[in-house]
Amino acid sequence: MKILVVEDEADLRATIGDVIRDAGHDLVEAGDDAAEACALVDQAIFDLVISDVRLPGLDGLDLMRRARKSAPLSEFILMTAYADVGQAVIALKEGASDYLIKPFSPDELLHHIARIQTTRAMRQELVGARQALALRPPANRLVGQSPQMLKIQARIETIAHSDAATLITGESGTGKELVAHLLHDRSARAGKPFVAVNCAGFPDTLIESELFGFERGAFTGAIKRRDGRFKAADGGTLFLDEIAELPLPAQAKLLRVLQEGIVEPLGTDTGVKVDVRLVSATHRNLRERIAQGLFREDLFYRINVLDVALPALRDRDGDLAILIQFLLDGFARADKAGNRRVPSISGDAYAALTAYGYPGNVRELAHAIEHAVVMAAGGEITLDHLPASIAEEAPLERPATIPPGGVPTVELAHLGQAMRAFEKAHLLKVLQAAGGKRVRAAEMLGISRKNLWEKLRAHETRELGEEPG
């Protein structure tokens, strides 16, 4: 980053400059000349400005306000003595990124810089995601630009024009039904029906009548004739989701339909000719089901003429940013004037979203973003607005480093402060031992994840000069 340091103490300014240069950043320095500092922020755009709160003839807060006029995206870190913390908190409320209390260590400075750099990278990722979404064809609902998803999109375009039975595999929440819709929409059958059936959603006694239909009186309760889903999809596409859950008797009838193109409704021997493309999906390993005697091998080959294997979200390198932006756009709420406002997202919330593993894949991510948009109520999405399962696994905002002796080297005014300092040091020590995993740290401490989360938030709130409410 391009960083400006404004500090009137020459020794401290030199030390800060060495730390920043060693970290690979471009550095510009301003000393006790207020006019020089003002001229620099007027003439150049800095990614980050690190400034003392109190300078001869200049107020750090005023410098921040001045720089923001020409460079609203510049970040600010204010350096302050302990007595000026209240002024630093005011600066935070006006948009400063952080503040440092003198004296501070090089590691602490580098941590603040790294966090800002991560936040700026996050913003650039989301800007890139917005640009990619703007260039994306409106009809393409399969969002992703990773090599894995580009291959999937190319495969869909290739096989969509075929009438061959297709099997879509992938973990739950990877978008199997969406792919089935795309195969239909891009085929010559697009103007015909698309009929979806969840094979796990019907009892064994009903799935055959649902698929193949029945005649009046075929069974108790069959008071009138009904066409099945195969007939309903005639000329179009029938999507059988969770096909691995289909009972064996229904599998046998399905195999015959695929072989002959004829459906026999329950209660009759008269066949009905149907023209249907079958697309099936499952999150299970069908070869294992075959070995267990739960799925017919001959049916497997019939439904698996063509295949699409969807990757898990954790394996889609580079897709998370564009998915987050796409979902933020989709769940944006209208304000009182009827304008849709897409919420921004804070750096710590974005870090939590990118650190989480998403066992529920894109479906879980969509639920998390919708939850956050509702909880943020039109404002910026922060860590507090995310589902607890994601927020609790967020990376630590501050480095879990413990000073020698295990207790922070601060002046303690009374016992309460000492106890809080010790608790914070112990929490950080245990988090360090747990590799930053809060679930494991809570187990080691013998407290709940929620209790650990509340304690960490309480310490963070006190550091900002406030009392936890």
Image: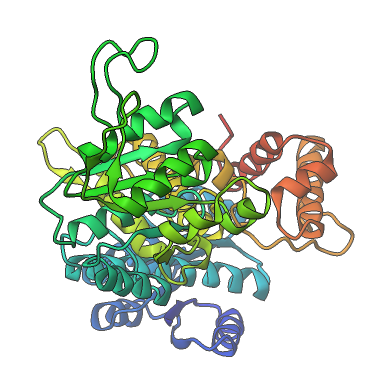
Colour setup of the view: rainbow
Q: Quadrant of the N terminus?
A: bottom left
Relative to residue 209, is residue 116 depicted above or below? below
Q: Is residue 158 visible?
A: yes
Q: Position of residue 89 (x, y in %)?
A: 48, 49
Identified at 14% across, 32% down, the residue is 336
Report which quarter residue 9 is drawn in: bottom right
Report which quarter residue 30 is drawn in: bottom left
Q: Position of residue 219 (x, y in %)?
A: 39, 15
Who is closer to the viewer here, 7 or 366? 366
Q: Which residue reaches farthest front?
A: 269
Q: Position of residue 403 (x, y in %)?
A: 81, 63
Determine whether, in the image, residue 433 is placed left or right of residue 64.
right
Relative to residue 25, is residue 300 depicted above or below? above
Relative to residue 430, is residue 110 depicted above or below? below
Who is closer to the viewer here, 393 or 202? 202
Report which quarter residue 186 is drawn in: bottom left
Who is closer to the viewer here, 273 or 60? 273
**Disc count in the image?**
0
Q: Is residue 344 visible?
A: no
Q: Which residue reaches farthest right?
A: 405
Determine whether, in the image, residue 128 is placed left or right of residue 169.
left
Identified at 30% across, 74% down, the residue is 154
Q: Position of residue 383 (x, y in %)?
A: 49, 46
Identified at 17% across, 44% down, the residue is 193
Relative to residue 50, is residue 336 depicted above or below? above
Q: Quadrant of the C terminus?
A: top right
